[in-house]
Image (cartoon, rainbow, N blue to C red):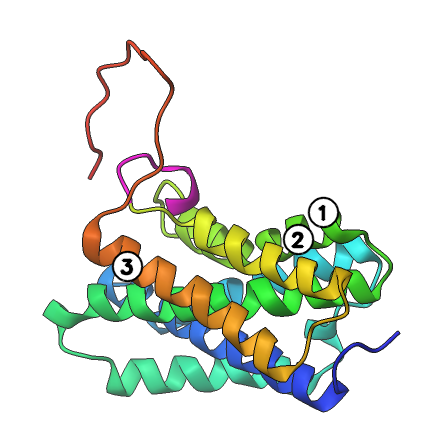
Amino acid sequence: MELLNPSLQHWLDLAGIFVFAISGALLAVRKNFDVFGIAVLAFATGLGGGLFRDLVIGAVPPAAFTELGYFLTPLVTTVLVVFLHPEVERINRAVQVFDAAGLGFFCVVGTVKAYEYGLGTVASAALGLATAAGGGVVRDILANEIPSLLRWDREIYAVPAVVGASSVALLLRFDALNNWTMAASALVAFVIRLFALHYNWRAPRAWRRRSAATEEE
């Protein structure tokens, strides 16, 4: 069952890979990784969520191993970042913006593909979240950081993806998904993440917790 034009879905997937790969490559630059390390983070961030999605729904071999564009996109991104990355003091902001864009793209595409493979509304939304957050989690682990998804001292990360994926799942459930509503869902997730970064929105912690943990650097 094809819910979207295959060509459109393909290009959206590539767009998500591109922006996530940029966030991974820029983090590698900030961590002072060499060229190989930059490429590893670019590939892991760009392809990690999609690989997980395809393996879960049984779309094997995963698209990352059958589509040349899926391999070339992180490679091109690596070359661009190596030679054209922003000034050091602007890298952190760039990482956040590109990561937010990738979050918006992937929560939509991941949800749609899961639904196409027969998953229900809730399961599709959950896999959309996993698709969106998976690459960022792999990126942070490889960069020796606690994933942003799990840190209480970082702005909300999963919530924007949950909102985007859930909206797409509901649109699918009521046969209201089209190019415009899909773009709107991705944009909503992107904007929520940017607002969270700007206004320092954070998810609540356990009620009446006794932990004295402080922000980790």
- Amino acid found under the numbered disc labelled 2: Ala
- Amino acid found under the numbered disc labelled 1: Val
Above or below, 136 against 12 in this view is above
Within 10 angstroms of label 2, few (less than 14), some, or many (20 or more) residues?
Answer: many
Within 10 angstroms of label 3, few (less than 14), some, or many (20 or more) residues?
Answer: some
Residue placed under numbered mark 3 in the picture: 195
* Residue 150 is inside the magenta segment: yes
Residue at (25% x, 59% y) in the render: 31
Within 10 angstroms of label 1, few (less than 14), some, or many (20 or more) residues?
Answer: some
**In this picture, which residue range is highlighted in magenta?**
148-154
Q: Nearer the viewer, residue 131 or 160?
A: 160
Q: Quadrant of the C terminus?
A: top left
Q: Looking at the rendering, which quadrant does residue 98 occupy?
A: bottom left
Residue placed under numbered mark 2 in the picture: 125
Q: Quadrant of the N terminus?
A: bottom right
Residue at (38% x, 20% y) in the render: 206
Above or below, 102 against 179 in this view is above
Q: Tell whether 131 sits left or right of 58.
A: left
> Do the residues under discs 3 and 1 have CB atoms within 8 angstroms?
no
